[in-house]
């Protein structure tokens, strides 16, 4: 058995979205065409609550580890489980908080966390350009930052690393990293071209869409909705892929027939609609993990519309890099 780590990323598009007609879901697949799945129907996760700074709407006066941001992530996990969807008995269980910041899977360890972590700003701001971590793809773990080997990487909101068996597709570990705010003050832009914020993405937890934030730390506004984007990443966590590939004719953020589904590979500022699964997202969940039925593990042909491009690596834990078109991020020289 060989394990491979696959990373799936979501970017941002600043625009207003109209609901399209439903279209088919896609499953994440290995290079061998094996569809991803958890063998277990009960899968735990842990959240590292440490954040350099928090939007006022994502913080409260209770204990540090129980902020609105924590609840937004928990709510996103619940969305994909039998607690909300009656067609599945998949359970994603909150196993509390952790101080671990290292994503990835160690087959020698007695236990590996399925981790959710908020990275404090961009690695290019804290990691020297000569540091070997850029070639190793390990700057995020070393400096607890979000890797941006290329300027375009700052369009990435979050990334999910899924370690799986390349032949069967069985998932062994999944970790989610958010490109969070580093705490510095400055303006935010609400214009369509502003997809590379200087101090990380400003996540908000406002329950209803409001006017876009224009400043980091601003309250009473919405920027990148944390719960919606966590819901998207958890789709990758359970084995779903993007329904299309940004840059393709059917994946334009303004006109794509897929643009309303949770697993669409771009988000829009102020959009809170993707806290709720569409019929297509629900169909994917319940096809893989049907209530009272066998997990769908049979091989499938690798989807041509997966929204990602992969590249293999060497070693016992060969790493494959999956990101949006032109957003290869890890293991590249700056």
Image (cartoon, rainbow, N blue to C red):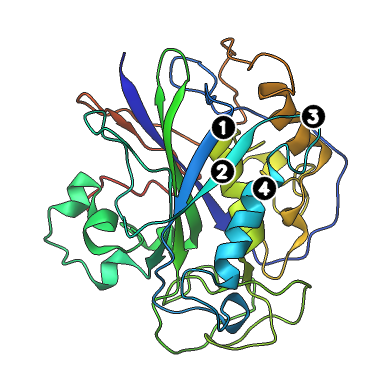
Q: Residue 94: x and y, percent?
A: 54, 49
Instruction: Choose between 325 and 181: the one closer to the eye.
Output: 181
Q: Disc 3 to disc 1, how far (Cα)?
A: 15 Å
- The image quadrant that residue 244 belongs to is top right
Question: In the rendered image, which residue does mark 4 sit on?
Answer: 78
Question: In the rendered image, which residue does mark 2 sit on?
Answer: 93
The numbered mark, 3 or 1, whose residue comes first in the sequence reads 1
Judge depth for marks 3 and 2 and give the one in front: 2
Q: For the point 62% across and 36% down, which residue is it?
A: 91
Viewport quadrant of the N terminus: top left
Q: Which mark is residue 42?
A: 1
Q: Few, some or many C-alpha atoms within 10 Å of disc 1 (few <14, some 14-19, many ≥20)?
A: few
Check disc 3 and report its element: helix, strand or loop. loop
Question: In the rendered image, which residue does mark 3 sit on?
Answer: 87
Labels 3 & 1 near each other (Cβ < 8 A): no
Q: Few, some or many C-alpha atoms within 10 Å of disc 2 (few <14, some 14-19, many ≥20)?
A: some
Q: Is residue 26 left or right of residue 37?
A: right
Q: Is residue 310 left or right of residue 92?
A: left
Check disc 2 and report its element: helix, strand or loop. strand
- The image quadrant that residue 236 belongs to is top right
The numbered mark, 3 or 2, whose residue comes first in the sequence reads 3
């Amino acid at each position: 058995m060989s394990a491979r780590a696959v990373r799936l990323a979501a970017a941002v598009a600043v625009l207003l979205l109209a609901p399209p007609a439903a279209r088919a879901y896609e499953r994440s697949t290995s290079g061998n065409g094996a569809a991803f799945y958890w063998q277990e129907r009960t899968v735990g996760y842990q959240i590292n609550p440490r954040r350099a700074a928090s939007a006022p709407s994502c913080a409260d006066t209770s204990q540090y580890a129980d902020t609105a941001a924590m609840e937004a992530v928990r709510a996103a996990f619940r969305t994909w489980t039998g607690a909300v969807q009656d067609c599945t008995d998949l359970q994603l269980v909150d196993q509390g908080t952790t101080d671990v910041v290292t994503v990835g899977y160690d087959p020698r360890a007695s236990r590996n966390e399925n981790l959710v972590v908020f990275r404090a700003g961009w690695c290019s701001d804290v990691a020297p350009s000569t540091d070997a971590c850029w070639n190793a793809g390990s700057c995020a773990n070393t400096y607890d930052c979000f890797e941006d080997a290329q300027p375009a990487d700052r369009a990435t909101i979050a990334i999910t690393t899924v370690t799986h068996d390349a032949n069967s597709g069985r998932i062994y570990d999944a970790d989610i990293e958010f490109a969070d705010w580093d705490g510095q003050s400055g303006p935010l832009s609400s214009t369509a071209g502003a997809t590379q914020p200087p101090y990380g993405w400003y996540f908000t937890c406002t329950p209803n869409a409001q006017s876009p934030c224009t400043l980091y730390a601003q309250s009473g506004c919405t920027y990148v909705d944390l719960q919606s984007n966590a819901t998207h990443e958890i789709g990758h966590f359970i084995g779903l892929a993007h329904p299309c590939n940004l840059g393709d004719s059917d994946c334009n953020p303004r006109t794509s027939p897929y643009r309303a589904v949770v697993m669409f590979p771009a988000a829009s500022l102020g959009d809170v609609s993707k806290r709720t699964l569409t019929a297509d997202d629900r169909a994917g969940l319940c096809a893989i993990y049907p209530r009272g039925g066998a997990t769908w593990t049979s091989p499938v042909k690798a989807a041509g519309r997966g929204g990602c491009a992969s590249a293999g690596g060497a070693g016992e834990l060969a790493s494959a890099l999956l990101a949006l078109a032109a957003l290869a991020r890890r293991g590249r020289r700056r």
